[in-house]
Amino acid sequence: MKLGAYRYWHETVLAALIAALMIGAAVVDPRFVSWKTQIALSSHVWELALLAVPMTAIIITAGIDLSVGSAMALSAVVLGLAYQAGANAWLAAACGIVAGALCGTFNGLAVAWLRVHPLIVTLATLAAFRGVAEGISLGRPISGFPASFTVLGLGTIAGVPIAGVIVALIATAAGLALARTPSGLSLYAIGHNPAASRFSGLPVARLTVALYALSGTCAGLAAAIYVARRNTAKADLGTGLELDVITAVVLGGTSIFGGSGRIIGTVLGVLAIHETREFVGWHWEHEELNAIVVGVLLIAAVLLNRLFTRPTR
Amino acid sequence: MLLETRDLGKSYGTVRALIGVSVSILAGEVHALIGENGAGKSTFINLLAGVVHPSSGSISIGGEVLEPGSVRASEAAGIAVIHQESTAFQHLDALDNLFVGREPRRWGCVLDRPRMRAEGRRLLAGLGETLQEGRPLAELSVAQRQMVAIARALSVRCRLLVLDEPTASLSARECGALFAAIRRLTAAGVAVLYVSHRLEEILALADRVTVLRDGSHVETRAAAGLSKDDLIRSMVGREVQEHGHGAPSAPGAVRLAVRSLSRSPCFHEISFELRAGEIIGLAGLVGAGRSEVAAAVFGADRPDAGSVLVDGRALPPGDVRAAIAAGVALVPEDRQHLGLVLPMTVGENLVLAVLASLARGGVRRMSAEAAVAAEQMKAMAIKADSPAVPVRTLSGGNQQKVAIGKWLAAHPRVLILDEPTRGIDVGARAEIYRLIRSLAAGGLATLVISSDLQEVLGLSHRILVMREGRISGELSRQDATQERILALAMPQEAAVAGVSP
Amino acid sequence: MTGAWLRSREAGVAGLILLTVAAVGTINPRFLSVENARDILIAASPGLIVACGATLVIVLGEIDISMGALMGVCAAVLGKLVSAEHAGLPVWLATLIVLSLAAGIGLINGLLVTVARVPSIIATLGMLTILTGVGDLLMAGETIGGFPDSLRAFAIGHVGMLPMPVLVALACLAAFTVLTRETALGRRIYAVGSNAHAARLAGLPALRLKVLAFTLTGLLTGVATLISAPQLEVIEAGFGRQFELFVVTAVVVGGASMSGGAGSIAGSALGVLLLSLVRTALIFLQLGIGATYWERAIQGGFILAAVLADHVSRRRRVQR
Amino acid sequence: MRHLAVILAVLTLAASAAAVAAEAGAQITVALLPKKKGVAYFTSCAAGAEQAAKELGNVTLIYDGPTDGSPEKAAALIEKWTLKGVDVIAVSPNDPEVLAPAMQAAMAKGVKVITWDADGAASSRSFFVNQATGTQIGEAMVDAMAKDLGTPAGKVAIVTATLTAANQNAWIAAMKAHLASAYPKMELVAIKPCNEDQKVAFQVAQDLMKAYPDLVGIFGISSVAFPGAAEAVKQAGRSGQVLVTGLATPNAMKGYVKDGTVKSVVLWNTRDLGYLTVRVARALADGVLIPGATSFAAGSLGSKPVAGDAILLNNLLVFTKANIDQFDF
């Protein structure tokens, strides 16, 4: 087999980097790599991982969604207000998820029907969604959710966090959907060439709307997990999260120009950011370093990708 | 001798686009370059322009060897090229388009607008055009844009002017102005390399003719005394065969009915019927509205008025998926942008139109997809290492076979082929003709849009001709000749007027 | 000619500005004071300056989102260099160093995009993240103050009637308008953004133009820092945060297309003015304390309405 | 036999005393979490904390916090420290509601958790190092403004950090209540966020003065909002006509106090606050500080009163032209 034919170069390099990091961390401080520590730290990554899954699919279609953090805040606030209004916490969570889905649908309709560039649409809704969240909550936090609900964010099944199980299920489903469903292959086709996709009878507009709606839905789910873990719903949560999500997806090997990318890469990208960040924090206790390390990691990964791989899917 | 190529060659991967071409061009001559689509003309021009780097050989101009693969060096050496594909800057106005890259300046950096304006007026006036300042090029007509491109080339004090299909979208009047300009240039000692499919133009204009076939140099000879048939023989490499067949053996029921279809300003009141087993040729000049009709029938564009019926049922307007569901398939002219997803694999492209129907319970069945891909690769005789290679890596002919095979996998009832053999070598072309005929014999209703009259005459049972957005006539197979089709296709003002000086 | 201009994007945004000013002015006439106009212009100055560079980058079909963090780093470096308690360098030298630093970061962005072929949104996102951390480290949790008067004159001084920042912004706008409309360089930038393939055929140095545009954006960010950071007596970490979002949004509202080729300095300037107006307008409307919580939503809705309306009308124009 | 018993008893006592002493003197790690790292206010607190750690000699101090003030990141830090097994976590909660679960989890793992600078839910910490309650701070700012104005009447506005900042909102609530009850003639006309951006604070204050020409006072209730608002008043040439007060470190405000734009700056001695926090942390780890205590020996600060579960710093300061030069933080 020729080297160029190997399709998983990026994932392999990324996995090797993560392995190297973990070995280095084990030498420096074995406690960091213990199962207990890793499970406990994992709770910091669920929202990021959950949002990175639909973002991967969106970037595969050459789109982008900058509004995920704001949609998450709006979902959380809707959840909180519904709960305050007397709804059962789970029903309130459903309301929040519906609100997220509506946010996403709005983005999708503007992109697919009005054909506005997704960067522009979501740049505008990035401000608008958070603004609505602030407006309806008057900036106040809402807390006091019942223990039966906080299980979603804090509970474990056989030692594995429930939120982690949900994220794993969604990521697996999305990975399979991308690789094994007609819609999945269609997304790659749309990313490479939307006109040819339309001429092949692919439901381009419908898939686009569905995709952004899905992104909003995941933002709603992420909001529910966040609220359950922190027991608070507030309009400022998820600020700046969109850039982390895009960083993770691109780090995972998805091309920002569309047409290529895999969920497994995104999972590794999320893992790479998470472990790097946590270890830097663990070892140096300087929050300022986190930003620098992640930025360098992003640019280095894209440069490495240039060196090692040809643009394939 | 002004320019000489020695053993010039270019390969893209395993595809040899140009093989050892040695040609010389004299100062002050109009040197025609002809060949079928895919014969290597564009590659030859790109090498002269410095856009691509030669794989072998060299170019020398005025006795000096040209630096290979450098646009700047070619320009500095006095080679100016007007490319066939759209090379205009749509957001800039005519004046900027004329001068971008070699702007007259004051104080080293500021544009000398008055000089640009004066020179622009002069250049366009020489072509019988007026200068439209301040409007982005996108708002001008196709012909106006073409004249701007030509004027741009003329604005350079060049020694060799390369014109690639300059008259494809020009009216007779504009052609006349262009030819007069060419004559003025050659009289001043400039050499013109003229690439065109319009053999009449070449016979009227050229001093010498070079013929390329399949990337190789066939011959270069004086144009005087040549006939069209001589040129065609030389390009094709065989006698033009007696082609065609009569009416379909068993004309079937009406499959496709188009009723008064209009879409302003592209086409108006288009009506025709297409029967099972029938092949209709749709002829006409580029810009007559043929592709636009196809796009409207296929649902890619929404018509202003009229209806499209398949098997008697009206299709919802502007709905590609409904058209496909009803059995309509379109192999578009621009296969690289509309027909195929080039970076995806052959296998994926072949199943793209039938993805959903091959899936079970919303899950792709890879084995079924592989079977369909293998079947089409065999049926279409697609030459590729495996279904897993990107379509991008295939030759033009094999790409077109994938574009057609993709639709055959969907078992269409109506097949529309827009320029099915453009840019395809002779061998693949013959295979595609054979395929179209056998599909029709199997009952498929087929509409072939083509600018190649030989192709239209060779394939069709009936021929419709379009002119300026309307159907100007219908010819039966028996009545049709190239001359008759041309007469219906050409704008009313005398078609050949532009050619005579 | 006039008809064409009236249908243009610039006219649309200008109309929206006039409408906003007229509406708010009717409700609260104090909004129409000269003083207020001056303050709005001063506040808009950094945006106006950086938008010049951002417009070039977007016209070339690229994007730069590192400006806010770069501004933070520039402010920190400037403060450390000139303030008496730190390096205490002469103002001209500190200015020179800050401008070189800013242009240098822009140059790195440009080289990442062209030579290393990293997509611009990724390269500048990485740069944004890195510079944010660097800025925080440089500030080291302290306030930096004690700017000498000669430096503060950049930000709060006047030349005749004109405040310095406005003067600098006008100069940048004029220079870049001339650059884009009346120089070969400017037209080439539009040509490359309009049709990269044709630009290659015309022998235009697309990569060098891109490097230049990113470098200029960096440099202008440095200039914007010089005229805005000394507006305050003391600065703290976080200076310039989210400035990039403001500038990119303004340029887009001003009519630049993400796919390149379209956009103008005038349009971007009007976009900056429109967005700068909104916050002030909301204060002058005196909607009361409750409405404060809806301000961000109103601003977001305003942006959304502006871009959606334009796209819909543009599509209608094309279809017609 | 009795001697032997006495000796044994003495030995046991000595051994246990030695054991206690050894434990009490053991090296401990204290993590000090600010609301937002990188602002001068908390940096000066950290300097005081560092001084206490140095004096004690057996405290390893970690000072880290979110650079963007994100409560989510603050919670993540608490969780990380819990895992690393630090002895005491001292939290200045930027959002008590968001941080409570993480703080409770830390306590459940045996980590001592205290709050400082701002309080959290009582169930999420054992003690609160209290320089002043939210109500006291809010009322102090209003009182300072009223005093500066001479006649407490007219329109006033607040420039806050963000609309969602929990501590700011608590102060605003206290200010509203105090204005309504104590100074009914002072009318609060606007609350505007500056989104943690000094330039926005500057511009918002400019706009407020023009939109409300009869405005008499502006509260800048964050270290970003206060200097921004003061600069706007100064540049508008309305120093003395529109008074600005609020919370900020004296070093940042010296210029404005001296030129009369600002008459009063409300704050406490931040170094002392950091110092006291580390002292409390040490005492808590040693088991010296127990519920029910009424006073606490805080090293060079002397004895500080304990009220319930709060150790009171009790030195809310108002910096004026007269005293501001005595402080350097």
Image (cartoon, coloured by chain):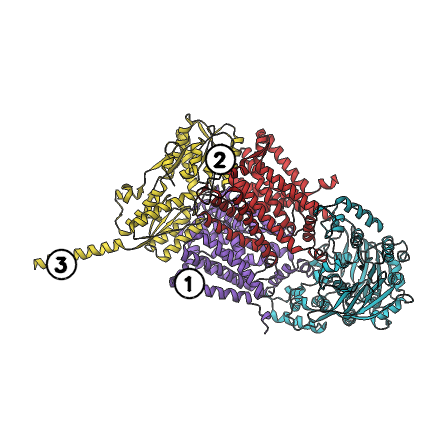
Three-letter amino acid code at the position of disc 1: Ala
Q: Quadrant of residue A299?
A: bottom right
Query: Quick one: C128 or B454, which is closer to the camera?
Result: C128
Q: Are marks 2 and 1 in contact (CB under 8 Å)?
A: no
Q: Secondary structure at mark 3?
A: helix
For residue C249, say whether it is visible. Answer: yes
Residue at the spot of label 3:
D8
**Chain in purple in the render:** A
Image check: B355 left or right of B433?
left
Q: Is residue C34 above or below residue C308?
A: above
Chain B rendering hue: cyan
Q: Give the chain letter for red.
A: C
| Three-letter code, disc 2 | Glu
**C225, above or below C116, in the image:** above
Mark nearest the camera among 3 and 1 is 1
Residue D76 locus on image (x, y percent):
42, 53
Foreground: B346 or A311?
A: A311
Q: Is residue D92 left or right of residue B191?
A: left
Residue C140: percent from left, percent from top: 44, 48
Q: Amino acid at mark 3?
A: Leu
Q: Colour of chain D?
A: yellow
Residues A248 and B444: in front is: A248
The residue at which mark 2 appears reads as: D231
Question: Which numbered tag is attached to residue B482?
Answer: none
Are dots 3 and 1 on a single chain?
no
